[in-house]
Amino acid sequence: MVGWCEISIAPHRRSNLAARRAIRNDRSLAMLPTTLRARFWLEALLALIAGLGFLVTIARRNWIEIIFHVDPDRQSGALEWTIIATLLVATVVSVVVARQEWRRAALA
């Protein structure tokens, strides 16, 4: 019995598709770095923490007032927007630097 996926792909294209997948898998395996320095893991962790902080601050802008029971900006929201901008920049910088470290390890 022939499955629906085999009918939708012409027979001569099936072998090409399998060959392309094999080549893509070989390339992706070759791109995996064998050794990553602790610096990469630190940068990736910082990116994760900053990204989560960014998302939490976007979702609940008054978390500072809730946790610390203070209102440093007197309900203006300026502190929250500063935190959002800072965490966004920290996330982007950490991701870029971690990616560079990943590529350095892949080329080594």
Image (tube, helix red, strand yellow):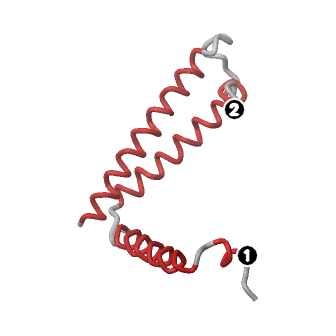
Figure check: 98 above or below 55: below
Q: Secondary structure under badge 1?
A: helix
Using the image as rendered, state which of residue 78 and residue 101 is in the foreground. Answer: 101
Figure check: 87 above or below 5: above
- Sooner in the amino-acid sequence: mark 1 or mark 2: 1
Residue 59's label in the rendered image is: 2
Using the image as rendered, state which of residue 81 and residue 66 is in the foreground. Answer: 81
Q: CA distance from mark 1 to mark 2?
A: 44 Å
* Residue located 67% across and 20% down the image: 70
On screen, residue 33 versus residue 7, left or right, reads left
Residue 49 x/y as whole percent: 53, 45
Tell me the kind of residue under disc 2: Ala
Residue 65 quadrant = top right
Using the image as rendered, state which of residue 29 and residue 4 is in the foreground. Answer: 4
The quadrant the C terminus occupies is: bottom left
Figure check: 17 above or below 74: below
Tell me the kind of residue under disc 1: Trp
**Disc 1 marks which residue?**
4
On screen, residue 59 versus residue 101, left or right, reads right
Residue 81 x/y as whole percent: 57, 21
* Residue located 55% across and 27% down the image: 84
* Residue located 54% across and 78% down the image: 14
* Residue located 35% across and 72% down the image: 30
On screen, residue 56 versus residue 25, left or right, reads right
